[in-house]
């Protein structure tokens, strides 16, 4: 894979000497050529920001992509790419032959004392395979794809909004003590769930929406070439009580696996749970075939917040849009965020491009409409689902019934992975009815978390 300095780094904000690469290879744009008034500034270089930068640059716009850290940088993530994520990467011309990527054919899931293996389902749009790749490698390579389209990348640079009369007028960049300002026509806010850039714009999170916490570390395993993701759906604490979350083991190939736990905020017990202790308990109960214990740990555990179901907002301002974790685009069913980062980045880019091409920024308002059409019903179902499984009794009932039927679990796998056939217009309605029926038929007192 290319060395980190293959990216055009602006460690400071003064003109930099271009590296010895031809302009054709790098889009012909170097930091010292950047206009102070690019069409678009993208704040944040993760999946959503890099995708937005890619598609806007590909459409011919001048784009500055601002990343506060330096590639490659670690992120708290399971590193898993579902077929939806693979599709988005295919559309951007990602090289799947890089040695860092390990191909995955499906999911091995444990629950209610039972094991099920399910291959990725066939789909008319998405491929029937996934992959595992460290975010440190993935994010750098996607940023390079954006750069090759002509986007200019500022690394080790913080961005803050300049607001005058209630409107975002400029973006102030700071790096190594140097400061400059850019005056874009539109800003794409892609700086994560906390969104420090978005706060002065009035961006916040819906406090009633569910969210999650995740903790992961890398471990050495002799079976890291396994072609299945693995998950434990009935996660338990040290006392053997069910908790609202799941554990995962994702093989990266070679000798390394990503092991972690994710917790949902939909149980009254949630605030008293310690993710570090849950990870230890999950590790102690890991299937023997991984041959992993605490002595196998390669890195310290790191944690992060999962903002779900479009809980961030407002989604659009007069000249800015939210994408990815800043938007809260994580799938509430699974905690998957990478695919939705890429997809919201692409959808935002389409709306921004249309607005710029028409010289009419009111067209940015079509972006929330597109999100609603694509995800609205699905994410509303997801929010109901995670509230239901936050009740340990309901979760046990779900596990007991579901794991008795592989066809039922394969259907559930398809739904939770958001891989339903696009022509099945009634599926979401069926899911609503199924969840509502489960809650209505539950014994008295079962509908409240405890």
Image (tube, rainbow, N blue to C red):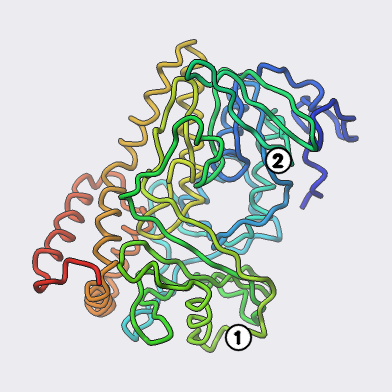
Q: For residue 293, which numbered disc appears in the image?
A: 1
Q: Residue at x 29, y 53 (%)?
A: 383
Q: Are marks 1 and 2 in contact (CB under 8 Å)?
A: no
Q: Residue 362: give x, y in percent of width and height.
A: 40, 16
Q: For residue 406, which numbered disc appears in the image?
A: none
Badge 2 crowding class, 10 Å Cα cut-off, few under 14, some 14 to 19, many 20 or more, is many
Query: Tag 1, which secondary structure?
Result: loop
Badge 1 crowding class, 10 Å Cα cut-off, few under 14, some 14 to 19, many 20 or more, is some
* Drawn side of residue 209 relative to residue 356, left or right: left
Which quadrant holds residue 90? top right
Quarter of the rendering occupied by the C terminus: bottom left
Please count the marks in the image.
2
Q: Which residue is mark 2?
A: 144
Instruction: Classify 365 as above or below 195.
Output: above
Instruction: Classify 64 as above or below 129.
Output: above
Q: CA distance from mark 1 to mark 2?
A: 36 Å
* Drawn side of residue 397 relative to residue 22, left or right: left
Q: Residue at x 57, y 18 (%)?
A: 169
Q: Residue 439: give x, y in percent of width and height.
A: 14, 64
Instruction: Classify 352 as above or below 278.
Output: above
**Front: mark 1 or 2:** 1
Q: Residue at x 39, y 67 (%)?
A: 271
Query: Tag 2, which secondary structure?
Result: helix
Q: Residue 23: give x, y in percent of width and height.
A: 82, 27
Which quadrant holds residue 268? bottom left
Q: Residue 82: give x, y in percent of width and height.
A: 48, 57
């Amino acid at each position: 894979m290319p060395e980190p300095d293959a990216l055009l780094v602006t460690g400071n904000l003064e003109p930099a000497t271009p590296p010895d690469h031809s302009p054709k290879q790098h889009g012909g744009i170097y930091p010292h050529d950047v206009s102070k008034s690019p069409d678009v500034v993208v704040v944040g270089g993760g999946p959503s920001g890099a995708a937005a930068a890619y598609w806007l640059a590909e459409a011919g716009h001048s784009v500055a992509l601002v990343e506060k850290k330096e590639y490659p940088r670690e992120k708290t993530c399971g590193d898993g790419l579902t077929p939806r994520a693979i599709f988005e990467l295919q559309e951007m011309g990602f090289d799947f032959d890089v040695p860092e990527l390990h191909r995955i054919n499906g999911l091995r899931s444990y629950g209610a004392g039972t094991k099920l293996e399910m291959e990725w389902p066939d789909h008319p749009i998405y491929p029937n395979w996934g992959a595992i790749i460290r975010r440190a490698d993935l994010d750098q390579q996607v940023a390079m794809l954006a750069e090759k389209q002509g986007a200019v990348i500022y690394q080790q640079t913080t961005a803050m909004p300049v607001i005058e009369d209630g409107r975002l007028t400029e973006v102030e960049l700071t790096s190594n003590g140097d400061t400059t300002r850019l005056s874009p026509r539109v800003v794409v806010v892609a700086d994560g769930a906390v969104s420090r850039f978005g706060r002065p714009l009035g961006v916040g999170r819906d406090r009633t929406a569910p969210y999650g916490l995740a903790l992961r570390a890398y471990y050495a395993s002799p079976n890291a070439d396994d072609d299945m993701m693995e998950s434990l759906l009935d996660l338990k604490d040290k006392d053997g009580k069910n908790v609202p979350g799941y554990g995962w083991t994702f093989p990266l190939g070679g000798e390394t696996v990503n092991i972690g736990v994710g917790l949902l905020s939909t149980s009254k017990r949630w605030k008293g749970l310690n993710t570090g202790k849950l990870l230890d308990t999950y590790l102690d109960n890991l299937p023997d075939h991984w041959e992993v214990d605490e002595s196998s740990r390669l890195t310290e555990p790191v944690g992060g917040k999962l903002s779900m179901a479009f809980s961030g907002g407002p989604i659009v301002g007069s000249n800015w849009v939210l994408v990815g974790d800043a938007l809260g685009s994580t799938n509430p069913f699974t905690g998957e965020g990478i695919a939705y980062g890429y997809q919201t980045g692409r959808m935002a880019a389409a709306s921004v491009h249309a607005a710029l091409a028409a010289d009419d920024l009111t067209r940015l308002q079509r972006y929330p409409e597109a999100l609603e059409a694509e995800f609205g019903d699905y994410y509303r179902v997801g929010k109901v689902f995670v509230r239901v499984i936050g009740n340990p009794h309901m979760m046990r009932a779900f596990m007991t019934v579901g794991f008795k039927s592989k066809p039922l679990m394969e259907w559930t796998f398809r739904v939770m992975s958001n891989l339903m056939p696009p022509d099945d217009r009634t599926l979401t309605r069926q899911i609503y009815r199924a969840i509502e029926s489960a809650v209505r038929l539950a014994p008295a007192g079962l509908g409240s978390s405890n």
